[in-house]
Amino acid sequence: MSDINQKIKDIISSKDIVLFMKGTPDAPQCGFSMAVSNILKNLNVKFEGVNVLSSDELRQGIKDFTDWPTIPQLYVKGEFVGGCDIVKEMFEKGELKKLFEDKSLLS
Amino acid sequence: MPLTKDEISKMIMSAFPDATLELKDTMGDNNHYSAKIISKIFNGKSRVEQHKMVYKALKGKMGNELHALALTTEEDK
């Protein structure tokens, strides 16, 4: 296994909710990343924003790791939940809140 | 080169021949699209799996030539 895969595994297992995004939660650099970041803020959950623009290796590595072509990517408890479209749809249908409830991540 | 609506439509319909497809060029710029795809091929698959199937049908263009495709997939029951 390559170093970057191990690094990504370490990141997603170290925090309950991890959002791989362009920019940071306070300064998103892409509308799709901002949308997901705002949804998580709206649900008032604690999450770790990982800026993929900080490293080309990470930016490509996360796409390969998840087998998913776009950023943002949301991981909850080490599992890939989805990209922007799926997260938005889950939020609108109340499924995202339920997922966080089920995993005892709502404060 | 950005992808035209026709090219996207062809790639999706060849992978999901039974699909009902609503494809929109949301900004009129050949660069931002939205697609709603309803197909029996999605039945029993998770949303993540369904979207991955669409990305595969787009043959690696998603995230490259194809900058933005807002995707909604639905099972056809």
Image (cartoon, grey):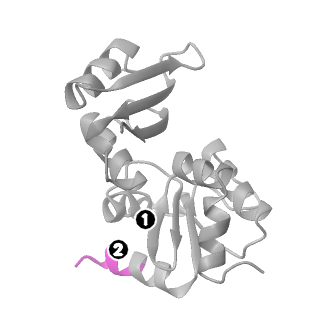
To which residue does mark 1 refer? Answer: A58
Span shown in magenta: A1-7
Q: Which mark is residue A4?
A: 2
Circle 2 sits in a helix, a strand or a loop, which is it? Answer: helix
Callout 1 crowding tier (Cα within 10 Å): few <14, some 14–19, many ≥20: many
**Taking B16 as reference, is A27 left or right?**
right
Q: Is residue B60 visible?
A: no
Is the residue A50 above or below the residue A82 in the image?
below
Dot 2 amino acid type: Ile
CA distance separating discs 1 and 2: 7 Å
Asked whether residue A61 is drawn in magenta, I would say no
Q: Which mark is residue A14?
A: none
Q: Are marks 1 and 2 on the same chain?
A: yes
What chain does badge 1 belong to? A
Please name the residue shown 48% across and 38% down the image: B72
Dot 1 amino acid type: Leu
Instruction: Tell me, yes or no, whether the two marked residues, 1 and 2, touch with CB atoms within 8 Å.
Output: yes
Q: Position of residue B37 (x, y in %)?
A: 40, 31
> Residue A40 or B40: which is nearer the viewer?
B40
Circle 1 sits in a helix, a strand or a loop, which is it? Answer: helix
Question: Residue A96 occupies which quadrant of the picture?
Answer: bottom right
Callout 2 crowding tier (Cα within 10 Å): few <14, some 14–19, many ≥20: some
Please name the residue shown 64% across and 68% down the image: A98
Q: Position of residue A68 (x, y in %)?
A: 37, 53
Please name the residue shown 52% across and 87% down the image: A14
Q: Earlier in the sequence, mark 1 or mark 2?
A: 2
Quadrant containing the N terminus of chain A in the rendered view: bottom left
Q: Is residue B71 visible?
A: yes
What chain does badge 2 belong to? A
> Residue B71 or B75: which is nearer the viewer?
B75
